[in-house]
Amino acid sequence: MQSLWNDLEAAQYQGDLALRVYTSRLLGRDKTLVLHGGGNTSVKVREKNIFGTEEDLLYVKGSGWDLEFIEAAGFAPVRLDHILKLVQLPQLTDPQMVNELVTHMTRASAPTPSVETILHALLPYKYVDHTHADAVIAITNTADGAARMREIYGQDVVVIPYVMPGFDLARLVAEIFAREASSKTQGMVLLNHGIFSFGATAQEAYERMIALVSRAEVYLQARGAWRLPAPDAKLADKPLRYDIAALRKALSETVGAPLIVATDQAAKYRGFAQRKDLSAISQQGAATPDHVIRTKRLPMLGRDVAAYAAAYKNYFDTHAPQAKSPVIILDAAPRVILDPEIGLAAVGRSAKDAAIVADIYDHTIDIILRSTALGGYRALPAKDIFDVEYWDLEQAKLKSGGKSPVFAGEIALVTGAASGIGKACVESLLARGAAVVGLDINPAIEMLFKRTDYLGLVCDITSDDGIRDALEKTVRRFGGLDMLILNAGIFPGGKRIDQLSTEEWRKVMAVNLDANFALMRECHPLLKLAPNQGRVVVIGSKNVPAPGPGAAAYSASKAALNQLMRVAALEWGADGIRINTLHPNAVFDTGIWTEEVLASRAKHYGLTIDEYKRNNVLKTEVTSRDVAELTAEMCGPLFAKTTAAQVPVDGGNERVI
Ligand code: ZN
């Protein structure tokens, strides 16, 4: 493990707290140390208060902050003497503890201090760093973890047996530390949990963390338990999308809300899922309390949805019948599914949730395999896992969860998404909480948005294989398909029929009609499996009800597409799929309409550009965003009972009216 400390970089951080920010970010950058908001750090400083009196403060990481991106504002300043008095109490519940911490901060706007604050306070060192390092957890999660820790670290670290994080752990650490710490002590290991390092400076504490964890890595290397051979698990060349979408539907029905099921067929995951000892090693429990909180209970093996349903039903019947919201209900169910073909499937109410679950389980697999290579993985005792799940603080966090966005857990596919109306549709759907896949022949589609709930795929929709490939990728990435926005289309330059070649005619038909037909056919089995029923929106054109001269191929293709939509509405109604069309007109903020083209068209009609843009009954400009917002609404509850509708979005057109 490499130290990322850099003198030049560090020189930009002046003062104790700034350097605390710097090395916290260094820790956060190494995912084998901390993952997604895991781990915490602190620094003790003396500051003058408003009366000019000096007082000792503990700046400790606030909850909700990720070490990798933390700023000074992410640290909560808590009065140190008050925390140290708390440790003298015989007992303190977690909510009481949080109340005491929050009411003894010196900045009202600071985040809630970490639940491990008391631990940081009572360790008598200026800088304290805490991580859930994979290597340390792999070694401590074995039958003789404590002995191995002493073998590796000798007197350099104090070893604490497993106790759930909170006040009891703090008391135990105070007691053991008073007895065992010496001038040689550089850190502390909490069995089945993680490691602390200490220092007089930010650099010393950080470098000690790197050095201590490196010793654990060397120990694993020496026993052939560090670099794990890649499993030989050949991926069958067959579509998985129907299986995955069916699994997602069943899970969503169990939980009572649509779910993202993000899958990954990497050999590492399929190999793990194919192990003969999978049950024994994966069904013991989580590796650290931090992982329990985010992945919940044990992974589900294979596609036995009944087991999933039973797991959460049992949990609720016994423990939490009052919890009704899907968000809370989901927190009782397994978040990870291991399947020999599908590989790793991570379940969440959003793509971001699912990605975090997948990341954490990826590290859990490393930990389990390394512990197994050392002689046997031992998870947290079952009772302790239960305690973590019931941890008052965690429950409080869940209950404060806000209302879900309208498309939470749903997946939309938009064609022609790199620009104009298509791109605006992607934005409107993302804004409503959907995970969105954008297709376009323009490679810019891939980098259009950099976020976990967006996937951009280069796709020529006139190729059936291209469509199938895109759908396979869509479902593997997010779990299914709920909404389809058929937007891609071409509008060639105006030509009268006597000038129009068969070749040009066929090209327009191939994109505007044939490709949409193939998309509808290929998407249908997936839309049928949408937990909240499938929805399709066709971006039509004013040219359907009111064609114009010089647009024969375009008008005919859009009219035929419109008729296709009406047939689909009839055929798919029984599957609960609704399909509707929007007829936009004169949307000028798209790639086709440059300033020059606009100016020349306006001049042609003897209008200014502004008059030309508003040349409709309502004298209003219609933008891509207007069309996109209506498209998204057509997929939402307002249109739940509407299918085969054709809605103009054109500011009113006299020929249509
Ligand atoms: Zn911890």
Image (spheres, grey):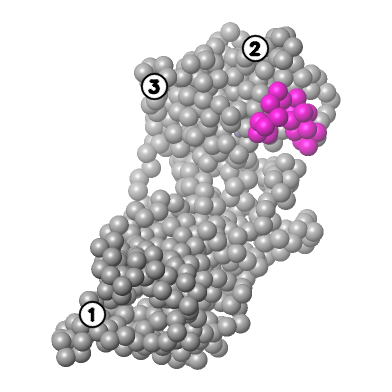
Query: Picture coordinates of residue 399 (x, y %)?
Result: 72, 51
Closer to viewer: mark 2 or mark 1: 1
- Between 397 and 241, the one nearer to me in the picture: 397
Q: Quadrant of residue 514?
A: bottom left
Q: Residue at x 50, y 74 (%)?
A: 618
Return the disc, 3 or 1, that comes first in the chain's sequence.
Answer: 3
Query: What residue span does the magenta drawing correspond to?
Result: 94-116
In the displayed structure image, the side of residue 317 where residue 633 appears, left or right: left
In the displayed structure image, the side of residue 45 where residue 428 appears, left or right: left
Disc sitting over residue 230 in the figure: none
Query: Picture coordinates of residue 565 (x, y %)?
Result: 44, 86
Residue under pointer 3: 9
Query: Picture coordinates of residue 532 (x, y %)?
Result: 58, 73
Return the disc, 2 or 3, that comes first in the chain's sequence.
Answer: 3
Q: Amino acid at mark 1?
A: Gly
Residue under pointer 2: 46
Query: Picture coordinates of residue 321 (x, y %)?
Result: 79, 60
Q: Residue at x 25, y 84 (%)?
A: 550
Return the disc, 2 or 1, that comes first in the chain's sequence.
Answer: 2
Packing grade of label 2 (10 A; few <14, some 14-19, many >=20) is: few
Task: Give the answer, above or below, for where 462 lies relative to 562.
Answer: above
